[in-house]
Amino acid sequence: MTLHVVPSFARIGEENAFAVLARATELQRQGKDIINLGIGQPDFPTPDHIVEAAVKALRDGHHGYTPANGILPLREAVAADLHNRFQVEVSPESVMIVPGGKVTMFMAILMFGEPGAEILYPDPGFPIYRSMIEYTRATPIPVPIREENGFAFSAEETLSLITARTRLLIINSPANPTGGVTPKAEVDKLVAGLADFPDVAVMSDEIYDQMLYDGEKHVCLLSYPEIRDRLILLNGWSKTYAMTGWRMGFSVWPKPLYENARKLAVNSHSCVNAPAQWAGLAALTGPQDAVHMMLAEFDRRRKAVVKGLNALPNVSCAVPKGAFYAFPNVSQTGWKAKKLASALLEEAGVATIGGPDFGVNGEGYIRLSYANSLENIERALVRMGDFLKSAKAS
Protein backbone atom coordinates (compact mmCIF):
# COMPACT_ATOMS: atom_id res chain seq x y z
CA MET A 1 0.00 0.00 0.00
CA THR A 2 1.26 3.47 -0.89
CA LEU A 3 -0.08 6.45 1.00
CA HIS A 4 0.25 9.63 -1.02
CA VAL A 5 1.06 12.33 1.49
CA VAL A 6 1.14 15.79 -0.11
CA PRO A 7 4.68 16.99 -0.91
CA SER A 8 4.38 20.09 1.28
CA PHE A 9 4.92 17.93 4.37
CA ALA A 10 8.45 17.14 3.20
CA ARG A 11 9.27 20.82 3.64
CA ILE A 12 8.38 20.91 7.35
CA GLY A 13 11.48 21.20 9.52
CA GLU A 14 12.01 20.49 13.22
CA GLU A 15 13.04 22.15 16.43
CA ASN A 16 16.19 20.21 17.22
CA ALA A 17 16.06 21.12 20.91
CA PHE A 18 13.38 18.44 21.27
CA ALA A 19 15.55 15.87 19.46
CA VAL A 20 18.42 16.70 21.81
CA LEU A 21 16.04 16.42 24.77
CA ALA A 22 14.96 12.96 23.57
CA ARG A 23 18.58 11.82 23.17
CA ALA A 24 19.55 13.23 26.57
CA THR A 25 16.59 11.43 28.15
CA GLU A 26 17.61 8.17 26.47
CA LEU A 27 21.18 8.51 27.74
CA GLN A 28 19.83 9.15 31.23
CA ARG A 29 17.75 5.98 30.97
CA GLN A 30 20.97 4.15 30.18
CA GLY A 31 22.36 5.38 33.50
CA LYS A 32 24.49 8.26 32.23
CA ASP A 33 24.67 11.54 34.15
CA ILE A 34 23.45 14.20 31.71
CA ILE A 35 23.31 17.93 32.42
CA ASN A 36 20.71 19.41 30.10
CA LEU A 37 21.51 22.94 28.96
CA GLY A 38 19.65 22.38 25.72
CA ILE A 39 15.95 22.81 26.32
CA GLY A 40 14.55 26.32 26.63
CA GLN A 41 12.19 26.16 29.55
CA PRO A 42 12.40 27.54 33.10
CA ASP A 43 13.38 24.96 35.70
CA PHE A 44 11.03 26.55 38.21
CA PRO A 45 7.55 25.28 39.03
CA THR A 46 4.48 27.25 38.00
CA PRO A 47 3.67 29.55 40.97
CA ASP A 48 1.19 28.06 43.42
CA HIS A 49 -1.53 30.68 43.01
CA ILE A 50 -1.64 29.99 39.27
CA VAL A 51 -1.96 26.24 39.81
CA GLU A 52 -4.70 26.81 42.39
CA ALA A 53 -6.61 29.01 39.95
CA ALA A 54 -6.72 26.13 37.46
CA VAL A 55 -7.84 23.69 40.18
CA LYS A 56 -10.57 26.12 41.27
CA ALA A 57 -11.70 26.53 37.65
CA LEU A 58 -12.12 22.78 37.35
CA ARG A 59 -14.02 22.60 40.61
CA ASP A 60 -16.20 25.52 39.53
CA GLY A 61 -17.22 23.60 36.42
CA HIS A 62 -15.11 25.17 33.68
CA HIS A 63 -14.98 21.92 31.73
CA GLY A 64 -16.35 22.92 28.36
CA TYR A 65 -15.54 24.86 25.24
CA THR A 66 -14.73 28.54 25.43
CA PRO A 67 -14.91 31.12 22.63
CA ALA A 68 -12.32 30.39 19.98
CA ASN A 69 -10.51 33.65 20.74
CA GLY A 70 -10.44 33.03 24.52
CA ILE A 71 -12.53 33.99 27.51
CA LEU A 72 -13.27 37.71 27.77
CA PRO A 73 -11.81 38.20 31.31
CA LEU A 74 -8.47 36.86 30.10
CA ARG A 75 -8.43 38.99 26.96
CA GLU A 76 -9.26 42.01 29.10
CA ALA A 77 -6.42 41.14 31.47
CA VAL A 78 -3.96 40.84 28.56
CA ALA A 79 -5.03 44.27 27.29
CA ALA A 80 -4.71 45.76 30.79
CA ASP A 81 -1.28 44.20 31.33
CA LEU A 82 0.04 45.59 28.04
CA HIS A 83 -1.35 49.00 28.95
CA ASN A 84 0.19 48.91 32.42
CA ARG A 85 3.62 47.86 31.19
CA PHE A 86 3.91 49.79 27.92
CA GLN A 87 1.23 52.52 28.11
CA VAL A 88 -0.41 51.25 24.91
CA GLU A 89 -4.11 51.01 24.22
CA VAL A 90 -5.17 47.49 23.27
CA SER A 91 -8.75 46.39 22.76
CA PRO A 92 -9.67 42.96 24.15
CA GLU A 93 -11.31 42.43 20.75
CA SER A 94 -7.85 42.43 19.16
CA VAL A 95 -6.45 39.81 21.57
CA MET A 96 -6.39 36.13 20.63
CA ILE A 97 -5.69 33.44 23.24
CA VAL A 98 -3.84 30.54 21.63
CA PRO A 99 -2.25 27.25 22.80
CA GLY A 100 1.37 28.44 22.85
CA GLY A 101 3.48 30.95 20.97
CA LYS A 102 4.05 28.75 17.93
CA VAL A 103 0.38 28.99 16.99
CA THR A 104 0.72 32.71 16.30
CA MET A 105 3.73 32.01 14.06
CA PHE A 106 1.75 29.31 12.27
CA MET A 107 -1.21 31.60 11.69
CA ALA A 108 0.79 34.62 10.57
CA ILE A 109 3.01 32.71 8.17
CA LEU A 110 0.04 30.82 6.71
CA MET A 111 -1.69 34.15 6.03
CA PHE A 112 1.22 35.62 4.09
CA GLY A 113 3.19 32.67 2.77
CA GLU A 114 2.60 31.48 -0.79
CA PRO A 115 4.70 30.70 -3.88
CA GLY A 116 6.36 33.87 -5.11
CA ALA A 117 6.11 35.66 -1.76
CA GLU A 118 9.11 36.42 0.46
CA ILE A 119 9.14 36.38 4.24
CA LEU A 120 12.04 37.84 6.23
CA TYR A 121 13.08 36.17 9.46
CA PRO A 122 16.03 36.40 11.90
CA ASP A 123 18.99 34.06 11.37
CA PRO A 124 20.10 32.69 13.75
CA GLY A 125 16.57 32.55 15.05
CA PHE A 126 13.81 30.27 16.26
CA PRO A 127 13.81 27.37 13.76
CA ILE A 128 10.03 27.21 13.33
CA TYR A 129 10.08 30.53 11.47
CA ARG A 130 11.92 29.06 8.49
CA SER A 131 10.17 25.71 8.73
CA MET A 132 6.73 27.25 8.34
CA ILE A 133 7.86 29.66 5.63
CA GLU A 134 9.15 26.74 3.57
CA TYR A 135 5.95 24.79 4.21
CA THR A 136 3.93 27.56 2.55
CA ARG A 137 6.36 27.58 -0.39
CA ALA A 138 7.19 31.22 0.21
CA THR A 139 10.86 32.14 -0.09
CA PRO A 140 12.60 32.46 3.30
CA ILE A 141 14.89 35.49 3.40
CA PRO A 142 17.28 35.36 6.39
CA VAL A 143 18.03 38.61 8.20
CA PRO A 144 21.57 38.14 9.57
CA ILE A 145 21.87 38.53 13.34
CA ARG A 146 25.52 39.31 13.99
CA GLU A 147 27.66 39.02 17.11
CA GLU A 148 29.49 42.24 16.23
CA ASN A 149 26.13 44.01 16.44
CA GLY A 150 25.43 42.66 19.91
CA PHE A 151 23.12 40.07 18.35
CA ALA A 152 20.64 42.86 17.64
CA PHE A 153 19.11 43.20 14.20
CA SER A 154 20.35 46.01 11.98
CA ALA A 155 17.51 48.21 10.77
CA GLU A 156 19.49 49.27 7.71
CA GLU A 157 20.33 45.70 6.71
CA THR A 158 16.80 44.49 7.39
CA LEU A 159 15.22 47.22 5.27
CA SER A 160 17.69 46.54 2.45
CA LEU A 161 16.33 43.00 2.14
CA ILE A 162 12.74 44.07 1.53
CA THR A 163 11.56 43.72 -2.08
CA ALA A 164 8.29 44.04 -3.96
CA ARG A 165 7.68 40.37 -3.10
CA THR A 166 8.09 40.79 0.68
CA ARG A 167 4.86 40.04 2.54
CA LEU A 168 5.94 39.60 6.16
CA LEU A 169 8.85 40.62 8.37
CA ILE A 170 9.49 38.60 11.54
CA ILE A 171 11.52 40.17 14.34
CA ASN A 172 12.43 38.82 17.79
CA SER A 173 13.83 40.76 20.75
CA PRO A 174 14.86 39.63 23.34
CA ALA A 175 16.02 36.88 21.07
CA ASN A 176 16.29 33.12 20.95
CA PRO A 177 18.96 31.68 20.56
CA THR A 178 21.35 34.58 21.14
CA GLY A 179 19.94 36.47 24.11
CA GLY A 180 20.37 39.61 22.02
CA VAL A 181 18.28 42.73 22.68
CA THR A 182 17.75 45.29 19.95
CA PRO A 183 18.05 48.88 21.27
CA LYS A 184 15.21 51.36 20.86
CA ALA A 185 17.19 53.54 18.46
CA GLU A 186 17.47 50.62 16.05
CA VAL A 187 13.77 49.78 16.37
CA ASP A 188 12.97 53.45 15.71
CA LYS A 189 15.01 53.31 12.49
CA LEU A 190 13.27 50.13 11.38
CA VAL A 191 9.77 51.52 11.97
CA ALA A 192 10.65 54.79 10.21
CA GLY A 193 12.01 52.83 7.23
CA LEU A 194 8.91 50.64 7.04
CA ALA A 195 6.96 53.74 5.99
CA ASP A 196 8.42 53.10 2.52
CA PHE A 197 6.95 49.58 2.54
CA PRO A 198 3.30 49.98 3.61
CA ASP A 199 2.26 46.56 2.29
CA VAL A 200 4.68 44.58 4.49
CA ALA A 201 3.17 43.05 7.64
CA VAL A 202 5.27 42.68 10.79
CA MET A 203 5.21 39.89 13.34
CA SER A 204 7.04 40.80 16.54
CA ASP A 205 7.92 37.81 18.71
CA GLU A 206 8.13 39.25 22.23
CA ILE A 207 7.80 36.04 24.25
CA TYR A 208 10.86 36.98 26.37
CA ASP A 209 9.76 40.58 26.95
CA GLN A 210 10.16 40.44 30.74
CA MET A 211 13.51 38.62 30.68
CA LEU A 212 15.94 41.52 30.53
CA TYR A 213 19.14 42.33 32.43
CA ASP A 214 21.61 45.13 33.07
CA GLY A 215 18.90 47.79 33.08
CA GLU A 216 17.65 46.98 29.58
CA LYS A 217 14.08 48.07 28.80
CA HIS A 218 11.83 46.19 26.44
CA VAL A 219 10.72 48.00 23.31
CA CYS A 220 7.20 46.80 22.51
CA LEU A 221 6.26 47.22 18.85
CA LEU A 222 2.72 48.12 19.92
CA SER A 223 4.24 51.45 20.98
CA TYR A 224 4.49 52.52 17.33
CA PRO A 225 1.04 53.66 16.14
CA GLU A 226 2.27 54.05 12.57
CA ILE A 227 2.50 50.24 12.15
CA ARG A 228 -0.36 49.10 14.38
CA ASP A 229 -2.59 48.41 11.36
CA ARG A 230 -0.15 45.72 10.13
CA LEU A 231 1.47 44.51 13.36
CA ILE A 232 1.01 41.04 14.87
CA LEU A 233 2.31 40.74 18.42
CA LEU A 234 3.32 37.30 19.71
CA ASN A 235 3.59 36.71 23.45
CA GLY A 236 2.47 34.31 26.16
CA TRP A 237 2.88 32.79 29.58
CA SER A 238 5.38 29.96 28.97
CA LYS A 239 8.63 31.69 29.83
CA THR A 240 7.64 34.46 32.23
CA TYR A 241 5.44 32.30 34.44
CA ALA A 242 7.17 28.92 33.99
CA MET A 243 4.11 27.57 32.18
CA THR A 244 5.63 25.82 29.15
CA GLY A 245 3.49 22.70 29.57
CA TRP A 246 0.27 24.64 29.99
CA ARG A 247 0.39 25.73 26.32
CA MET A 248 -0.74 29.28 26.87
CA GLY A 249 0.00 32.08 24.45
CA PHE A 250 -1.63 35.24 23.22
CA SER A 251 -1.40 37.47 20.21
CA VAL A 252 -2.60 40.93 19.31
CA TRP A 253 -3.87 41.34 15.74
CA PRO A 254 -4.71 44.34 13.60
CA LYS A 255 -8.40 44.53 12.78
CA PRO A 256 -8.05 43.44 9.11
CA LEU A 257 -6.41 40.14 10.17
CA TYR A 258 -8.24 39.25 13.37
CA GLU A 259 -11.13 37.38 11.79
CA ASN A 260 -8.67 35.29 9.75
CA ALA A 261 -6.90 34.29 12.96
CA ARG A 262 -10.19 33.44 14.68
CA LYS A 263 -11.23 31.22 11.77
CA LEU A 264 -7.89 29.43 11.86
CA ALA A 265 -8.43 28.80 15.57
CA VAL A 266 -11.89 27.35 14.90
CA ASN A 267 -10.51 25.08 12.20
CA SER A 268 -7.43 23.89 14.12
CA HIS A 269 -7.81 23.78 17.90
CA SER A 270 -11.37 25.10 18.54
CA CYS A 271 -10.29 26.88 21.73
CA VAL A 272 -7.67 26.85 24.45
CA ASN A 273 -8.00 24.56 27.48
CA ALA A 274 -10.60 26.25 29.73
CA PRO A 275 -8.98 25.90 33.20
CA ALA A 276 -5.61 26.91 31.75
CA GLN A 277 -7.16 30.21 30.70
CA TRP A 278 -8.27 30.90 34.27
CA ALA A 279 -4.73 30.06 35.37
CA GLY A 280 -3.44 32.59 32.84
CA LEU A 281 -5.77 35.19 34.31
CA ALA A 282 -4.38 34.53 37.80
CA ALA A 283 -0.84 34.84 36.43
CA LEU A 284 -1.46 38.33 35.02
CA THR A 285 -3.57 39.69 37.87
CA GLY A 286 -1.92 38.00 40.85
CA PRO A 287 1.37 38.60 42.67
CA GLN A 288 4.49 38.87 40.52
CA ASP A 289 6.98 37.92 43.26
CA ALA A 290 7.79 34.56 41.67
CA VAL A 291 8.58 36.25 38.35
CA HIS A 292 11.00 38.67 40.00
CA MET A 293 12.65 35.86 41.96
CA MET A 294 13.08 33.75 38.83
CA LEU A 295 14.61 36.63 36.88
CA ALA A 296 17.03 37.43 39.70
CA GLU A 297 18.16 33.81 39.71
CA PHE A 298 18.51 33.76 35.91
CA ASP A 299 20.67 36.87 36.17
CA ARG A 300 22.92 35.18 38.72
CA ARG A 301 23.30 32.16 36.45
CA ARG A 302 23.84 34.37 33.38
CA LYS A 303 26.84 36.00 34.99
CA ALA A 304 28.27 32.63 36.01
CA VAL A 305 27.78 31.02 32.61
CA VAL A 306 29.33 33.94 30.70
CA LYS A 307 32.33 34.02 33.02
CA GLY A 308 32.74 30.24 32.76
CA LEU A 309 32.39 30.11 28.99
CA ASN A 310 34.94 32.87 28.47
CA ALA A 311 37.40 30.86 30.58
CA LEU A 312 37.14 27.82 28.27
CA PRO A 313 39.93 27.27 25.75
CA ASN A 314 39.24 28.97 22.39
CA VAL A 315 35.70 29.94 23.41
CA SER A 316 34.32 33.45 23.71
CA CYS A 317 30.87 34.52 24.81
CA ALA A 318 29.15 37.86 24.37
CA VAL A 319 27.05 38.93 27.33
CA PRO A 320 23.37 38.16 26.65
CA LYS A 321 21.06 41.01 27.58
CA GLY A 322 17.81 39.03 27.57
CA ALA A 323 16.05 35.65 27.58
CA PHE A 324 17.93 32.78 29.29
CA TYR A 325 20.40 31.71 26.62
CA ALA A 326 24.11 32.13 26.02
CA PHE A 327 25.42 31.82 22.46
CA PRO A 328 29.17 31.30 22.76
CA ASN A 329 31.47 31.53 19.76
CA VAL A 330 33.25 28.17 19.34
CA SER A 331 34.71 28.80 15.89
CA GLN A 332 38.29 28.82 17.23
CA THR A 333 38.00 25.35 18.80
CA GLY A 334 38.45 23.58 15.48
CA TRP A 335 35.03 21.94 15.79
CA LYS A 336 32.00 22.42 13.59
CA ALA A 337 29.22 23.57 15.90
CA LYS A 338 26.81 20.65 15.51
CA LYS A 339 29.58 18.08 15.85
CA LEU A 340 30.78 19.80 18.99
CA ALA A 341 27.28 19.86 20.46
CA SER A 342 26.85 16.15 19.70
CA ALA A 343 30.23 15.25 21.18
CA LEU A 344 29.56 17.27 24.32
CA LEU A 345 26.36 15.31 24.84
CA GLU A 346 27.69 11.84 24.02
CA GLU A 347 31.12 12.13 25.59
CA ALA A 348 30.90 14.85 28.23
CA GLY A 349 27.28 14.45 29.27
CA VAL A 350 26.33 18.08 28.54
CA ALA A 351 23.35 18.79 26.30
CA THR A 352 23.64 21.94 24.15
CA ILE A 353 22.27 22.91 20.73
CA GLY A 354 24.44 23.49 17.67
CA GLY A 355 24.11 26.97 16.22
CA PRO A 356 23.23 25.77 12.69
CA ASP A 357 19.97 24.38 14.11
CA PHE A 358 18.95 28.06 14.30
CA GLY A 359 20.06 28.97 10.77
CA VAL A 360 23.04 29.17 8.47
CA ASN A 361 24.44 32.12 10.40
CA GLY A 362 24.57 29.98 13.52
CA GLU A 363 27.66 28.10 12.38
CA GLY A 364 30.51 28.69 14.80
CA TYR A 365 28.20 28.93 17.82
CA ILE A 366 26.35 26.68 20.25
CA ARG A 367 23.39 27.57 22.43
CA LEU A 368 23.31 26.95 26.16
CA SER A 369 20.20 27.50 28.23
CA TYR A 370 20.93 28.68 31.75
CA ALA A 371 17.46 27.56 32.83
CA ASN A 372 19.15 24.98 35.03
CA SER A 373 20.58 25.16 38.53
CA LEU A 374 23.79 27.08 39.17
CA GLU A 375 25.32 23.89 40.54
CA ASN A 376 24.56 22.03 37.30
CA ILE A 377 25.81 24.93 35.18
CA GLU A 378 29.11 24.95 37.04
CA ARG A 379 29.45 21.16 36.69
CA ALA A 380 28.69 21.45 32.98
CA LEU A 381 31.33 24.12 32.47
CA VAL A 382 33.96 21.92 34.15
CA ARG A 383 33.01 19.03 31.87
CA MET A 384 33.13 21.24 28.80
CA GLY A 385 36.55 22.55 29.77
CA ASP A 386 37.91 19.06 30.35
CA PHE A 387 36.49 17.92 27.02
CA LEU A 388 37.91 20.80 25.02
CA LYS A 389 41.35 20.32 26.56
CA SER A 390 41.49 16.61 25.82
CA ALA A 391 39.35 15.90 22.75
CA LYS A 392 40.57 16.30 19.21
CA ALA A 393 38.27 18.19 16.85
CA SER A 394 36.63 16.04 14.18
Image: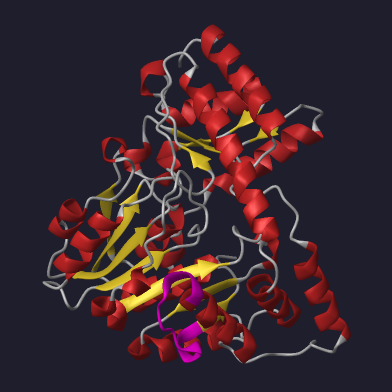
Residue 61 can be seen in this image:
yes
Number of dots carrying numbers:
0
Q: Residue 238 occupies which quadrant of the picture?
A: bottom right
Stretch of the chain drawn in magenta:
84-95
- Location of residue 314 with respect to 175 vertically, above or below: above
Q: Give residue 219's quadrant in the image.
A: bottom left
Decide whether residue 269 is among the magenta residues: no
Is residue 276 positioned above or below 1 on the image?
below
Q: Is residue 270 above or below residue 22?
A: below
User: Measured from the top left, where is residue 52 in percent x and y?
Assistant: 83, 71
Q: Residue furthest top?
A: 390
Q: Give x and y (percent) for residue 281.
A: 67, 78
Quarter in which the N terminus is drawn: bottom right
Quadrant, the C terminus: top left
Name the residue nearer the viewer: 298 or 20: 298
Residue 385 % position (x, y): 56, 15
The reply, left or right, for residue 165 in relation to residue 375 is left
Residue at (63, 88) in percent of width and height: 73
Q: Nearer the viewer, residue 352 or 110?
A: 352
Residue at 31% across / 80% down in the picture?
228
Q: Residue 200, position in %: x, y?
A: 22, 73
Q: Nearer the viewer, residue 363 or 49?
A: 49
The residue at the far right in this view is 59
Q: How is the image coloured?
A: secondary structure
Query: Does residue 39 appear in this view?
Result: no
195 vs 270, left or right, is left
- Check the image and report above or below for 166 versus 121: below
Q: Is residue 30 left or right of residue 139?
A: right
